C-alpha cells in the first residue's frame, strides 16, 4: 500500500506571493487581509472576507435598486461611518493594529489606508466607481459620479473640497519646493492608485512603525512581503539586509546588501552599504565596488 500524499499548507508569505503574482487577478482586499497573518498566524482570511461580504449584504438591503450614484454614496457614508462606526484611531494612530484589516474590522478604528480598503470594497459592491488615492501624507478615496468627482477622507468621513485638498498639500509642497513657479496642479496628486501601490503603502506604514521600534523580526517579515510585492525596489532589499544584520543573520544580510550594490550602481549610500558588507565579512573581493 503506497504512502499517502502529504501536502504542506502554504506559508503566509507563499500565500501572499500567490495573491500578488499578477496584477490582472490581484484582489486588493484579500491581499491586504493576508498581511494580518504575520501578527495572527491562526487567522482565517476566508472568514474575514466572509465578514466583509456580510457587511456588503446588509448595505445592499439599504440601497434601493433604482438609487442614483449620489444616493448610493450617501447611504454608504451613513452605513460605514455612522451605523458601523468606522473612524480614524485618533487616540493611538501609530498602533500597528491600525494597519491590519483583521484588527480594524474588530475595533472599527484604523488609519486612512486600511479604512479606505474596506470603504472601497463596499462602494464597489453597490455599484459605485471608487479608487484609492495615494495623496501625500493622507490616503484618500475618490468616487466618480455623473455629477462629478467626490473625494472622501476615510479617516473622518468628510467630503473634501478643492480648497481643503489644497490646504492638505501645503506642508508637502513647502518641503519639496513645489510652490510658486514650481507648483504642481492638484489633479496630479489625485491620480488613482493601483492595488499594488496601495499594498506597498500599507506595508511601508508598518515598516516605519517596526523600524522606529527597532522590532527587527517584525520588520523583516514586512520587508519579505515588500520584496515579493516589488521585486525591483532594491532599497527594500537593502533595508531587509540591514534588518537581518541587526538580527545576526549574516548570510541573509550579505545576500540582500550585495544584491542592492549590484543593481544600484549609482547608490548615494554605496560607501556605507559596502562598509556594512565588509563588517559582515564581505568586501572588495566580491567585486561589489
Image (tube, rainbow, N blue to C red):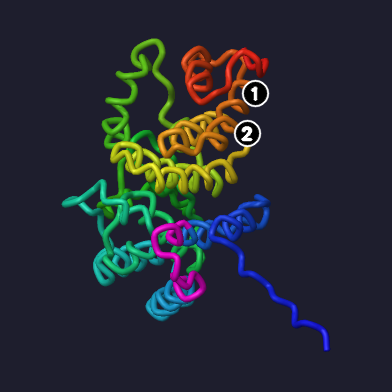
189 above or below 277? below
Q: Please state which of residues 161 and 34 is positioned toward the viewer in this rendering.
A: 34
At 38% from the left edge and 17% from the top edge, which residue is drawn?
Answer: 178
274 above or below 87? above
| Res 263 label | 1
Element under label 2?
Answer: loop
Residue 211, quarter of the rendered image: top left
Quadrant in which the N terminus is drawn? bottom right
At 41% from the left edge and 43% from the top edge, which residue is drawn?
Answer: 219
Discs 2, 1 touching: Cβ within 8 Å: yes
Q: Please state which of residues 33 and 183 is positioned toward the viewer in this rendering.
A: 33
Element under label 1?
Answer: helix
At 41% from the left edge and 13% from the top edge, which residue is drawn?
Answer: 182
- The percent position of residue 208, horizontal first and vertical second, equals 36, 38
- The percent position of residue 45, horizontal first and vertical second, equals 49, 69
Residue holding disc 2: 232
Residue 95 relative to residue 264: left or right: left
Residues packed near mark 1 inside 10 Å, few (<14), some (14 to 19) or many (20 plus) = few
Amino acid at each position: 500500500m503506497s504512502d499517502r500524499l502529504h501536502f504542506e499548507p502554504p506559508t503566509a508569505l507563499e500565500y501572499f506571493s500567490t495573491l500578488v503574482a499578477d496584477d490582472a487577478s490581484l484582489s486588493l482586499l484579500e491581499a491586504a487581509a493576508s498581511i494580518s497573518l504575520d501578527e495572527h498566524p491562526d487567522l482565517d482570511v476566508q472568514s474575514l472576507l466572509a465578514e466583509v461580504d456580510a457587511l456588503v449584504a446588509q448595505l445592499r438591503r439599504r440601497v434601493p435598486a433604482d438609487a442614483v450614484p449620489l444616493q448610493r454614496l450617501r447611504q454608504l457614508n451613513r452605513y460605514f461611518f455612522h451605523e458601523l462606526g468606522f473612524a480614524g484611531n485618533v487616540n493611538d494612530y501609530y498602533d500597528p493594529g491600525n494597519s491590519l484589516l483583521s484588527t480594524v474590522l474588530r475595533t472599527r478604528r484604523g488609519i486612512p489606508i486600511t479604512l479606505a480598503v474596506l470603504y472601497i470594497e463596499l462602494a464597489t459592491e453597490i455599484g459605485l466607481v471608487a479608487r484609492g488615492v495615494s495623496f501625500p501624507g493622507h490616503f484618500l478615496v475618490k468616487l466618480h459620479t455623473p455629477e462629478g468627482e467626490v473625494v472622501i477622507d476615510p479617516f473622518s468621513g468628510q467630503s473634501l473640497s478643492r480648497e481643503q485638498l489644497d490646504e492638505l498639500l501645503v506642508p508637502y509642497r513647502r518641503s519639496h519646493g513645489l510652490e510658486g513657479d514650481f507648483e504642481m496642479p492638484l489633479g496630479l496628486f489625485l491620480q488613482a492608485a493601483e492595488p499594488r501601490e496601495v499594498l506597498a503603502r500599507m506595508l511601508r506604514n508598518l515598516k516605519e512603525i517596526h523600524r522606529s521600534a527597532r522590532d527587527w523580526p517584525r520588520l523583516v517579515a514586512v520587508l519579505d512581503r515588500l520584496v515579493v510585492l516589488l521585486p525591483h525596489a532594491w532599497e527594500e532589499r537593502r533595508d531587509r539586509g540591514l534588518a537581518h544584520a541587526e538580527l545576526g543573520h549574516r548570510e541573509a544580510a550579505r545576500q540582500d546588501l550585495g544584491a542592492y550594490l549590484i543593481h544600484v550602481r549609482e547608490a548615494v549610500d554605496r560607501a556605507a552599504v559596502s562598509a556594512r558588507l565588509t563588517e559582515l565579512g564581505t568586501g572588495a573581493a566580491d567585486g561589489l565596488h
